[in-house]
Amino acid sequence: MANTPHGGSLIDLIVRDAPRRDALVKEAATLYSLTLNERQLCDIELILNGGFSPLDGFMSQADYDSVVSDLRLSNGLLWPMPITLDVNAAQIKAGNIAPSTRIALRNPQDDTVLAILTVSDIYTPNKSREAAAVFGADDVAHPAVHYLHTQTKEFYIGGKLDAIDVPVHYDFVEHRFSPAELRAYFKKLNWTRVVAFQTRNPMHRAHRELTVRAARARHCNVLIHPVVGSTKPGDIDHFTRVRVYKALLPKYPQGMASLSLLPLAMRMGGPREALWHAIIRKNFGCTHFIVGRDHAGPGKNSAGQDFYGAYDAQELVAKYKSELDIEVVPFQMVAYVPESDEYIPADEVPEGVKTLNISGTELRRRLKTGAAIPDWFTYPEVQTILRASHPARSAQGFVVLFTGYWNSGATLIAQALQMSLNQGGQRPTTLLLGETIRHELSSELGFTKRDRDLNISRIGFVAAEIAKCGGAVIAAPIAPYDAARIEARKVVERAGGGFFLVHVATALEDCIARDRTGTYERAKRGEIKGFTGIDDPYETPTAPQLTVDAAKTPVSQIVHEIILLLEAQGYIGSR
Ligand code: PPS
C-alpha cells in the first residue's frame, strides 16, 4: 500500500475539476491573466497534481504567517515552506485584484491557462522576517533569500485554485509521474515499501551503494526521485542528469529501482527543505525517505560559513518524526576503500584504512580539463554521458575576435590562422571577415556607432552559436568600440565558448602606407564619411589576450603566437 498523503487525502485538483474544465477555459478567456515565472510554474504543477497536498492554492496570509513562524498551516498541520504568489502594485491595479477577484494563471512557456485563482487576500510580506525564519538568515548569499529580495514582487496574493491543465512537458515524458500515477505504478509493480532518494546531482557508484543499503536495511524498493525544476545555480542541467539516472537503473538488481522526475523548484532551505521534501515524497506514495548530510544545503553565507550544520536537516526531521508519517532514513555516507575495492559506510571504516573520494567540485574540474575520472568513482556509461555534455577544452568551441584599424593586417592573419587550424583538423573553423559579415549579415547597416555596435553584436551572436556546437570562429571586423567587444565576449562565454581578443595594433600610418586601394585617401578627402582613424574613433582594447603589430611582425609569427595561446588554454592539441 502506498503511503497516505499528507493531511489524509490526495488533493488532485486536475481530477476534481475535470468535469468543469470546458466552462473554466471559457471563463479564463474573460479574466485578467498573470503569467507565472519558472518557480511559480513548478509550484503550481505540484499544487494542481497533489504533490503539495493538502495545499489547494497559494497561501493566504494566515497560512503564510503560521508557516513562517511555526512550520505549520493555520489548521496546525505540519508544513515548513511558504508557497506564495507574488504580484506588484501595477498588476493589482491592472487586474483590479481584490478579495474574490478571479485571475487566470498562465504558463510562461506556451501561454496556456493552467488554473483560475480566486483571490482570498492580498498582503505585504516582511521579506527579512521570512528570510530569517525560513532560511535561517537574511543574507543574500543564500539563493532563496537572494530570490526573495531581487525577484519577488512586493505583495502576495492568496487563494484557492480551480484546475484547468498541468504544464505540458516534452522531455523524458515517460519518467514524469503525478502522485496518482506513481501510486498506481507502485501498485502495478506490487511495491509496498518504497524508499525515495532526492537528488539534484548526477549519481555515481556511492549513490547506488547507499540507496541499495537503505533498501536492504528497510526491505524497500528504491525510487530515484530527482528534482528537475529549478535547483542550485551552477548545477549540472537536468537533461544530462536524467540521462545519467537512466544509465544507472540497470545497475540495480532485479528491477529494484525506478525513476520518476520531480518538477520541484528547490529553495536550498536545508532543514526546512528536508521536511518539505519528506512531505512531498509521502504525497507521491513513498513510505521511506533518505535524508543526507547537508540536505538541500545552499553553501556558504556571506561570512564564509555554512548556512546550516551538516546534520541540522536530519535533526529537524527527527524532531517531527511522529507527525511526518514517512520513515526518514538518515543517509549513511559511504566511502570507497581501495584496499578491498568496495564502498562501506564511513563510520564502519576501520582505523587507519585509507578511503578515497572525489568531491563535486573536483569532478567538475576534471570534466572541464578532461582529466581522468576513475572507474571506482563512476560507471563508464555515466562517464560517457557526462563527458558528452561537458567536453574537455580540446573539444569546446572558441572565438578569436580580431580588432584594429582597417587594413591593419587582421584579415591576412585571420586567413592564415584558419589555414593553421584546418591543418590541425581538431574542429570545424568558420572565418567571419568584415567584408563577409557586411555582405551576408549586416548589409543594411552603415557606420554610425549604433550600426557598428549592432554589427559586432550580430557577429557575437553567430560566433556564440557556432562555439556552442564546438566550432572555432575567427572574426575580423574593425570593431572599434570597447563596450561592443566586451558584450561579444559575454555572449560567447555564456554559450560556453572560449573568447580571445587579439588587438592588431598596427599603427594608423602603417595601415595608410600599406593601402594600395586609395580608400584612406578617399576618406581623407571626405569622400567616405566617418572612416575609422580618419574622422571616426577607435578605442584601444582594455584587456586583449594578445596585442600584435602586423607592420613589425611576420604573419606566420603572429599566427604562431595565437596557436601558443590556444594551446596554453587547452583548446588545441591533446594533453
Ligand atoms: S565595424 O566598425 O567593425 O562594424 O566595421 P567593419 O564591419 O569591419 O567594416 C569595415 C569595412 O567597411 C568599409 N567601410 C568603412 N570602414 C570604416 N569606416 C567607414 N566609414 C567605412 N565605410 C566603409 C571598410 O573599407 C571595410 O571594407 P572591407 O571590404 O571589409 O575591407
Image (cartoon, rainbow, N blue to C red):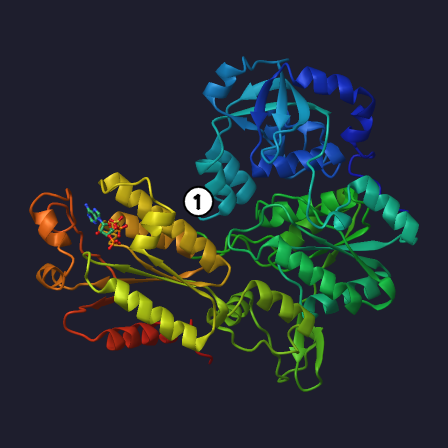
Q: Which residue lies furthest to the bottom in this view?
A: 339
The answer to whether residue 411 is seen in the rendering is yes
- Residue 5 locus on image (x, y percent): 81, 39
- Residue 422 locus on image (x, y percent): 42, 73
Q: Which of 506 and 106 is in front in this view?
A: 506
- Residue 320 locus on image (x, y percent): 71, 45
Residue at coordinates 24% horizontally, 73% vertically from top-left? 555
Residue at coordinates 57% horizontally, 44% vertically from top-left? 267
175 shown above or below 145:
below
The answer to whether residue 200 is seen in the rendering is no
Instruction: Using residue 415 as the reference point, say whether residue 367 is left or right of it.
Output: right
- Residue 167 locus on image (x, y percent): 68, 36
Q: What element carries label 1?
A: loop
Residue located beneath label 1 in the image? 140
Q: Nearer the viewer, residue 112 or 58?
A: 112
Q: Nearer the viewer, residue 206 or 7?
A: 206
